[in-house]
Amino acid sequence: MKRSEPFVAIGTFIIMAVLCVCTLGQQPGTIPQIALPILGGKTLRAEDLKNNIVVLDFWATWCEGCIIEIADFNKLEKEYSSRGVKVIGVAVQSGWASDIQKFTKQYKMRYTVLVGNDDTVSDFGVISFPNTYVIGPGWKLYKKYSGVSETKAADIRRDIETLLKAKS
């Protein structure tokens, strides 16, 4: 046995463990409950959404990638709201609700925006923005997207269609 073989085996094991952990976040499963204020004052709870398909996007006002995605989320809201799909943005690390309200008007956000907090970010394991969760009925995680990509909106649209067919 060569001296390097144990190191190769350990390295392979570590790589496989990291890949497994990364894909676990992408599999269906339970996710934390939420109870957060909607801009305007009322509180939205996960239990209020249990029968819906939800696109839950964690974003920040200072995040350029988040700003780029607003138009796509507006389109998803327009296209799917009549079919019971809820597009919800969770603003975090973005100042007071009044600051977020100004931002949503400036960028013409047409979907529900919640005021998040550090606990919510921690509960969901968000470490970067944007971070988007596609949630199926029963508040079950269907898929998670981290960052921005050219295909993200199309991928989410495909996820929504799959969940709508399964719900029928």
Image (cartoon, rainbow, N blue to C red):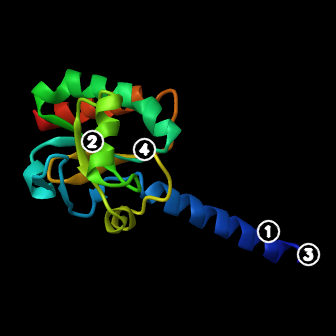
| Badge 1 or badge 4: first in the primary sequence | 1
Q: Which mark, residue 146?
A: none
Q: Which residue is mark 3?
A: 2
Residue 92: in sight, yes or no?
yes
What is the distance, in whole Å, between disc 1 and disc 4 at their CAs? 44 Å
Q: Secondary structure at mark 4?
A: loop
| Badge 3 or badge 2: first in the primary sequence | 3
Q: Quadrant of residue 118?
A: bottom left
| Badge 2 or badge 4: first in the primary sequence | 4
| Badge 1 or badge 3: first in the primary sequence | 3
Q: Nearer the viewer, residue 75 or 6?
A: 75
| Badge 4 or badge 3: first in the primary sequence | 3
- Image spot of residue 167 (x, y percent): 13, 37
- Image spot of residue 168 (x, y percent): 10, 32
Amino acid type at mark 2? Gln
Label 4 CA crowd tier, 10 Å (few <14, some 14–19, many 20+): some
Which residue corresponds to the image point at 41% horizontal and 51% vertical from the top-left? 26
Count of numbered badges drawn on the protein: 4
Q: Which residue is mark 4?
A: 61
Q: Nearer the viewer, residue 28 or 146?
A: 146
| Badge 1 or badge 2: first in the primary sequence | 1
